[in-house]
Image (cartoon, rainbow, N blue to C red):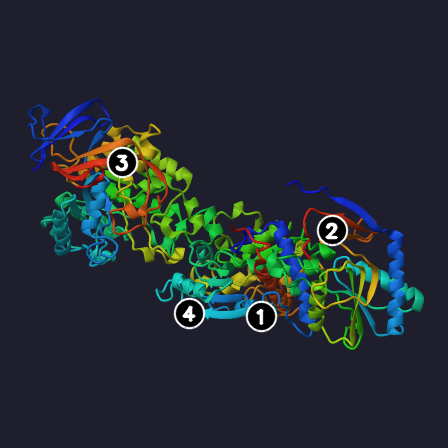
Amino acid sequence: MKRHLLSAADLSRADAELILSTAAELRELADRPIKKLPALRGRTVVNLFFEDSTRTRISFEAAAKRLSADVINFAAKGSSLSKGESLKDTALTLEAMGADAVVVRHGASGAPHRLAHSGWVRSSVVNGGDGTHEHPTQALLDAFTMSRHLGQGQARSLDGRRIVIVGDVLHSRVARSNALLLHTLGAEVTLVAPPTLLPVGVGTWPVEVSYDLDAALPKADAVMMLRVQRERMHGGFFPTAREYSRRYGLDGKRMATLQDHTIVMHPGPMVRGMEITADVADSDRSVIVEQVTNGVAVRMAVLYLLLGGSTPAVGGEE
Amino acid sequence: MSEYLIKNVAVLGGTPTDLLLRDGVIADPADAPADAEVIDASGLIALPGLVDLHTHLREPGREDAETVETGTRAAALGGFTAVHAMANTEPVADTAGVVEQVWRLGREAGYCDVYPVGAVTVGLDGERLAELGAMADSAARVRVFSDDGRCVSDAVLMRRALEYVKAFDGVVAQHAQEPRLTVDAQMNEGELSGRLGLAGWPAVAEEAIIARDVLLAQHVGSRLHVCHVSTSGSVELIRWAKGKGVDVTAEACPHHLLLTDELAATYDPIYKVNPPLRSAADVAALQEGLADGTIDIVATDHAPHPHEDKDCEWAAAAFGMLGLETALSIVQQTMVDPGRLDWAGVAERMSYAPARIGRVSDRHGRPVQVGEPANVVLYDPGARRTIEPSESASLSRNTPYRGMELPGRVVATFLRGKATVLDGKLA
Amino acid sequence: MPAPPETQRVVLDAGDIQRALTRISHEILERNKGADDLVLLGIPSRGVPLARRIAERIAAVEGYDVPVGSLDVTMYRDDLRMKPARALLPTEIPPEGIDDRTVVLVDDVLFSGRTIRAALDALNDIGRPKAVRLAVLVDRGHRELPIRADFVGKNLPTSLVERVKVTLADVDDADAVTIQTTGQEVPA
């Protein structure tokens, strides 16, 4: 039985397309007067957040509530590494509460995997972002947003579409999940970053890698800008914010080299002026606000497909 | 004291013969008294008592993980008659007082001889030399110095330590890990670390220090020991240094001879160790280096941790795994059974050589022959056993071999003629 | 025990279906006194093409395009938890909405009534119709809830070991209603 969503790699193409088509139906709910469905009545979804992330938590919370689930928000403050709240003890508490699904956000890569496989809990585990590993629901909502703009009709296909992901790939869970999922969905992914911000072994990923943003932009159907934290500068990953922006930032001039249909995305939160200028973020090409709306629909689809029936309909874990 | 007449035992796997253990030494079996306890050792081999140059006994300070008593019990069950206890205790073994305490605890426990390792720098902080001479002159007679767990990364300090220990024939055992290249490092850096989002521990961080240290040792004419070599590049560097005549020795750990970094994909910190599990190519290079003598010895890096330090997310977990009770089986599986080493080679790498490096070969690491100290292991290479953590004599349970079937079983261990293990159980 | 052989017989052919739908269309118009305020909502999957065909007939008679949509009831089903999670089917509410209109739900087979119960709940979350009617191509009986159809193409008394299958040219090969006899009871 498939129970968890831990990595975008867990999803087959059929799984991913089912989630996206389900999300497409649920997206319509946002336009109705009563934004609620009874599918998860009596189910309990716990948002277990070891890291602050208001936007992801709210998105999952809205998704669960619109499906009539009971939602418990559990903010385990402080990092896992400070020996305060242990993941295990928290998990045992949740188990005692009868959680049907745990959405876990954690600073340690693999924490959701550990939660799902340690025998601490019986519930479904949804990875809400773990360390520098993955953020599969973000990738799903990005793919969903792309398919609404670029997909051919109902097919939801991204076959052959060129997606350029720019920025701090090394520390980005969004980039990892997107690279895996977009490849599964047939898109051609190009990662653009300074060599210092690419992980060792990226050559084995199912993607193209480039150091040259200007060369990659004209062919792109979608451009996703990743957040670059200024602190990385102190790690010596790049010399100055100014040099980073000049080489890898998306500004109006670069935007002008895009094809007419090309969309600009950002998983948020944005660092305006660093990886993206305000005029680009606020332009017609920007689908950043829409990404938020789509996030709720996609997370509803994931929760419904994992919890709605007697057994989950998607996911790769036994 | 009992006298043991061991019948039909294959010394170093050779032709079966008899051994008499009497008065702490190996004696002529023709002199066996009628009331000697007879052990039928048909099918068993005899090896010299094993010597571990790299054990963490955790006492003082972390008696919740291991004590000298429980750690030496585990050692005896693994066939060891001597262990070198690493200095990263709380307080750190950086004074004569602490090393004498550990030494005394070992004598009281009586399961094997405990030789404390002294810290190179005060508090393992890598800033100033500990009182190495005082530790050398203490009752513990320290000859091996190491900041293990941390690297003596300062080149000048390392040079001084290498020079200083020459006065008492000591050796610096380096934990080779360039600290700036391994900030927050979690696992071997490679394709997998990138995929799993775990910070990488690159091979170059080990190799850069080894390269520097062999050049330093050559420059100042000192002897150097390299702890837990884990990469093929390190093996190459040590091979090169030995070719140049540098007085360097090196150890490999059983887990690095068998396990690979693929296990990190489970995110189960039972596989988290420092240096990390490496690639299959590194494992092969270590096996080859151990076979050709580039790597001198096997050392366990037995590192007990309480359950809660492993029953958590990977990044929060402690580094290290148990090793004493499984070391000989792993060496059999990875080296003997595939034909890379014979039992004489095992004796060299797990007894003679570590005793020489630790400067304890007046008592340990001696041949199994008449007139030598009766430190002997009887081992059944034909047995097979499934590893069950709860059966360990260690206080801790963090073995990465849980559920694995391994070859061989220690049947008996004798420390100066006294059985510490008989019939595979503590005597 | 070997299962009895499955048998299959056609109870309505393409012509029967055409005539039934035409009659239903006229009955709807009569009952509603015209096409004003009507909204037809088909229940996926086969209720949707049936609703469209009825709308075509009404347009032919009245010269007025009745709004047609679809109403997926998957999430409102009372047996949702008894099977693996199912893919959703389209819900398309016509832009005119359903408030203060007469909604005619259209489905292929009326059996236990549970699907219609779910549809009424689903409608409740979408708006407040003036009235809700039910049109079905086949009523095979065995109701488990106090629900009846307002417009029926054919009443078809069946046994619980029989399965009623509707195929429509829009989605299947051809128009037909068949009854299959199976070895065991068919879940309602």
The residue under label 2 is: C162
SS at circle 1:
helix
Q: Mark 4 belongs to which amino acid?
A: Lys
Q: Position of residue C153 (x, y in %)?
A: 84, 60
Q: Position of residue A224 (x, y in %)?
A: 60, 60
Query: In the image, which is nearer the foreground, mark 2 or mark 1?
Result: 2
Which residue is pictured at 20% across the width and 45% down the height?
A: B73
The residue under label 4 is: A77
The residue under label 3 is: B409
Does residue B289 appear left or right of residue B99 in this picture?
right
The residue under label 1 is: A65
Labelled pair 2, 1 in contact (Cβ < 8 Å)? no
The residue carrying pointer 1 sits among few (fewer than 14), some (14 to 19) or many (20 or more) residues within 10 Å by Cα, namely many
Q: Nearer the viewer, residue B254 or A315?
A: A315
Q: Mark on residue A32?
A: none
SS at circle 4:
loop
Q: Is residue C52 above or below residue B277?
A: below
Q: Mark 1 belongs to which amino acid?
A: Lys
